[in-house]
């Protein structure tokens, strides 16, 4: 069974940084793509960043220039480095993985809280 487990969330002051990690287990080959999403209270889940197996990335406008997504295929891990955090970045952050058969798996989420 494929599982994604996020870690690295927490409480940080505005302007600070956090690094989220997401480890995939139960897979036989690297995920075709990984994504980081977030959902704030009362809002819909939104895509923050994506990365393909070849390393091509895509970012939400709000994340460009502040966040960086990367992956280590040998460790089946995807990262999200978040810098210059703002209170509006407060949300539960979710990792998603899509395999070569286009099957998606979600992690359980990790809370990020940015205080002003």
Image (cartoon, rainbow, N blue to C red):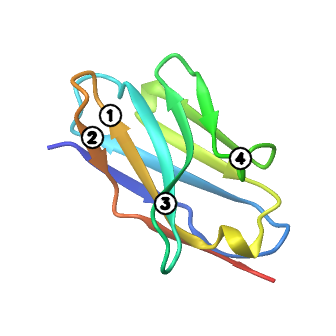
Q: Are marks 1 and 4 in contact (CB under 8 Å)?
A: no
Dot 2 or dot 1: first in sequence order is 1
Q: Nearer the viewer, residue 27 or 99?
A: 99
Tell me which residue sits at (71%, 46%) in the image. 61
- How far across and down, in percent of the image, does residue 109 sit? 41, 64
Cα gap from disc 2 to disc 1, whole angstroms: 4 Å
Cα gap from disc 3 to disc 1, whole angstroms: 19 Å
Horizontal placement of 88 versus 111: left or right?
right
User: Which mark, residue 61?
Assistant: 4
Query: SS of the residue at dot 3?
Result: strand
Dot 3 or dot 1: first in sequence order is 3
| Quadrant holding the C terminus | bottom right
- How far across and down, in percent of the image, does residue 65 sit? 81, 43
Dot 1 or dot 4: first in sequence order is 4
Q: Are marks 2 and 3 in contact (CB under 8 Å)?
A: no
Q: Nearer the viewer, residue 95 or 40?
A: 40
- How far across and down, in percent of the image, does residue 58 sit? 61, 33
Cα gap from disc 3 to disc 4, whole angstroms: 24 Å
Question: In the figure, residue 85 lies in which quadrant?
Answer: bottom right
Query: SS of the residue at dot 1?
Result: strand
User: Which mark, residue 98?
Assistant: 1
User: Which mark, residue 104?
Assistant: 2
Dot 4 or dot 2: first in sequence order is 4
Cα gap from disc 2 to disc 3, whole angstroms: 19 Å
Q: Nearer the viewer, mark 3 or mark 4?
A: 4
Q: Which residue is mark 3?
A: 7
């Amino acid at each position: 069974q494929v599982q994604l487990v996020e870690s690295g969330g927490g409480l940080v002051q505005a302007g600070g940084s956090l690094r989220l990690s997401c480890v995939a287990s139960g897979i036989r080959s690297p995920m075709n793509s990984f994504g980081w999403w977030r959902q704030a209270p009362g809002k819909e889940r939104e895509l923050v960043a994506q990365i393909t197996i070849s390393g091509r990335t895509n970012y939400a406008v709000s994340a460009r220039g502040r966040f960086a997504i990367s992956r280590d295929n040998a460790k089946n891990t995807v990262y999200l480095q978040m810098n210059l955090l703002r209170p509006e970045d407060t949300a539960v952050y979710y990792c998603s993985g899509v395999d070569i058969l286009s099957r998606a798996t979600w992690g359980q989420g990790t809370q990020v809280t940015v205080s002003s």
